[in-house]
Amino acid sequence: MQLQTTWCWLVAVYLFLGGLGAGSFITTAALYLATGERFKRTVRFGGWAGAVAIGLGALVLLADVGKPLRAVVLFRSFVNLSSWMARGAWLLFAAIIIDGLFAVFSTEVLVGWVARVWEPLATRRNLWRVILGVVALPVNLGVAVYTGVLLGVLPFRPFWHSWLLPALFTASALDTGVGLVAGYVAWREDSAYVGKLHSALEGTIMALVAVEGAVLTWFLSTMQGGSLDAARSAELVTAGQISPLFWVGVVGLGLAVPFLVALSQLSGVAKRSAVIVPLVGAASCLIGGWMLRYVVLTAGLRASLSSPSLLQILAGVRFWP
Amino acid sequence: MATQYGFYVEVEKCVQCHACEVACMAKNNVDLGVRWRRVSSIWGGQFPNVTNTSISLSCMHCAKPACMAVCPTGAISKRAEDGIVVVDRSKCIGCRYCFFACPFGVPQYGNDGTMQKCNLCLDRLGDGKEPMCVTTCPASALHAGPVEELAKLASTKAATRLAGATQPSVLISK
């Protein structure tokens, strides 16, 4: 039997889904609070996207731990609240509940069911959604930031140990979240104001891609100028074994393609009727987001497992007379 | 200061026979592939003046254990009476966060998925015996006990306590 000590790709999937869910819910809640009932379909979709993506992420995380059935009993397994994993578990739990409730109140069929149980709850649905949306914004932002903090607080993993990592993952979470919602808007939204919304989202994507690119550059150049292990990991990413994944996946699919697609939409180069273009942009953005988590995770693992961290600790001790 | 148990490793005595590792595995009945104690080989110098030193290390029972700080379930604790870092495997969920927090890669995971590591052979200590690795070492390169006593033992040689933010409770002869 293969004994597993490191985190595998499942954890990258979880970090990605947590960010995606949080990002799409933040987009949706902001949209709802700003425009109210104008974009019903998109608000419903975004609510569910948040709850389902974060919920799936939590399931993936459970699938990766050694004792899933023990871990799922949150109040027994996540009691050390100075641990970021425990804090994160509770954040995920809160986000799933709040996003889920928001989604329920955004879905006509389910509101009908709620009305049958307790009428006043359903009639004031819009008020609940405003309250849930306001509460959900910091909680979901917390989830997005936490996916980076989880790795960033580990002091002996030099490639992860930086506040720039949560910044990078948060930028990517917002980027993929807006990307997913923009893809849905292009595909299904039928509101009379869809053109305006579409343009606003594409503009946001361009801005977020620029921010993410800047943070990514900052992160990698900081690592390159950092400790030996950090520099080695950065080199692994930009010029080593996993550099194809980085340049094609993270930079190409995650940044360049969404940026160009958004530009084509705004400038009118691609016809608005060609739904396939924004859908490709959204898909590309999501793949890039996952690749980013995978590349960062892998680079941090490799460096620490192959690096002589023991030697560093023993520095100054002479072994041979 | 509270008593802190730890190890003293006389590196120049180690012959890299791995008997400590095997004794540890047998005594603690650990799964194949899990290593509570590890003999590492450290290469130095440049050809043709090359050196090879071996060192046997396990959990460092740090004064400030990084693993304990990040454990979400509180399964890892530090005993007040002797500073030994222990894990309650009935609480562990096997998330492996402690592995990434530990600067020495000490936490191990067996077939049941939970974390396991050196506990300084607590049961043997209770019987007034030494840990199995110490008893077994044919070169007497390993010693265990309160760090102050180990420091006295090591005072005949230039020995140093391992440096590090977590303050490992391990002395190494120079």
Image: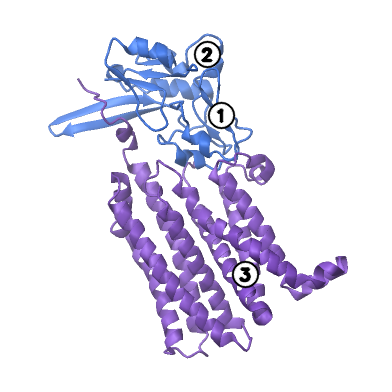
Count residues near mark 3 (Cα–Cα under 10 Å), then give few for <14, some for 14-19, many for 20+: many
Which of the two marks, 2 or 3, is nearer to us in this view? Answer: 3
Q: Chain of mark 1?
A: B
Q: Which circle marks residue B119 in the picture?
A: none
Residue to which mark 1 is pinned:
B77
Q: In this rendering, does residue A267 appear at all?
A: yes
Is B22 situated above or below A12?
Answer: above
Question: In what element is the residue under mark 2?
Answer: helix
Q: CA distance from mark 2 to mark 1?
A: 18 Å
> Which residue does the numbered mark 3 point to in the structure image?
A29
Q: Which chain is blue?
A: B
Q: Is residue A241 visible?
A: no
Question: Could you say which is closer to the camera, residue A315 or residue B91?
Answer: A315
**Residue B125's disc number:** 2
**How much space separates mark 1 and mark 3, taking CA atoms?**
42 Å
* Residue occupying image coordinates x 50% and y 74%: A282
Name the spot of residue A293 as percent of width and height, x first: 45, 58
